[in-house]
Image: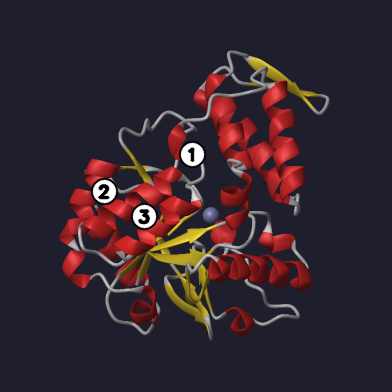
Amino acid sequence: MILALHGAINAPDPQSFTSRNFVSEQEAIQQFKLISAQVVDVAEAVSGRGIAITVDDSTEAAANVARLLADAGMAVTLFVNPWNIESRQVYPFAVLNCALDQTSLQQVGFEGVVYPLADRAAKERFRRLVKSRLLSLRNEDDRVSFAAYTAEALCVPAPAIPSYLQPPTLDDLQSLLDLGVHIGNHGWTHASYAIMSAAEFTEQVRLAEGWLREHGLYEGDLFAVPDGKALPMRPARASDFGTVLLADDRLRPGRVGPCAHNRVSVDEVSTSNALTDQIDRARLDSIS
Ligand SMILES: [Zn+2]
């Protein structure tokens, strides 16, 4: 079984969009320690033994949990997008989430329509709309521009972005590697792999692979698909990318193709939603 999370921070606020997908570092480490005897690296978990831990994205929150787990003696693989590390840009979703939390608007005019923002549920509906627009843009520059346009519409043209959403530096990655963290390929950018042509998909994977190799970070041929739901099937084959990791809750955990493995998302580990319970549920559901 392979677990997937996005990072840990000091005190995530369950009501905020900014810290969504991040677990509390104290609770997470406490709970991961309970399974530490079963933790193996991804290659071993792919062949059906033990539990591997993976962390996605180029954020300090992701690097933080990878470091904490490695410090506690656990194998962990961090999947990064080199584009963010090189350009020092945060993800478009970070801009959107921070702007949503920081706006004081009660409603927003957006692409000619007025949307309410008076409570969290209304903001969540607006977020879903912007998210679907972002996922329809395959180019990262267009996504960055669209997030900036959304932030302006929310009257927060330059939202404050907490440090945990900033990309780690190359030095950070190198010190993680020294600690024993494996670094994996999450594609050059975090663009929409589900709508890319096979050639674009291949280019994204190869560019990231080249960058990881050039900086001595590349260890094997693991590719975790951004957003977790697209397989490079037509006309390229998944086998062209080594082992492809998904995180798709519509599929059962475990092997989902000759070279594809579906992970179990554990972004909501907490005292009330224990890691061991989530693993037990995934085991019952598992196909491998
Ligand atoms: Zn990701």
Q: Is residue 34 above or below residue 235?
A: above
Contact between marks 3 and 1 (CB within 8 A): the answer is: no
Left or right: where 199 falls relative to 167: right
* 223 or 273: nearer the viewer: 223
Disc 3 residue type (three-letter): Val
| Residue linked to disc 1 | 165
Point out the tag, 3 or 1, that comes first from the N-terminus. Answer: 1
Which residue is under mark 2? 28
Residue 96: x %, y % from top left: 61, 33
Q: Can you tell which quarter of the image residue 112 is in?
A: top right
**Label 3 environment density (alpha carbons within 10 Å; few <14, some 14–19, many ≥20):** many
User: Quick one: SS at disc 1?
Assistant: helix
Circle 3 is placed at which residue position?
266
Q: Does 157 sit above or below residue 229?
A: above
User: Nearer the viewer's eye, disc 3 or disc 1?
Assistant: 1
Quadrant where the N terminus is found in the figure? bottom left
Q: Residue at x 66, y 82 (%)?
A: 237
Q: Earlier in the sequence, mark 2 or mark 1?
A: 2
Which residue is at a point 29% across and 67% down the rendered structure image? 75
Asked if residue 277 can be seen in this view, the reply is: no
Mark 2 vs mark 3: give the one in front.
2
Numbered disc in front, either 2 or 1 = 1
Name the kind of residue labelled 2 in the image.
Ala
Instruction: Answer few, some or many: residues within 10 Å of disc 2's Cα (few below 14, many 20 plus, some between 14 and 19).
Output: many
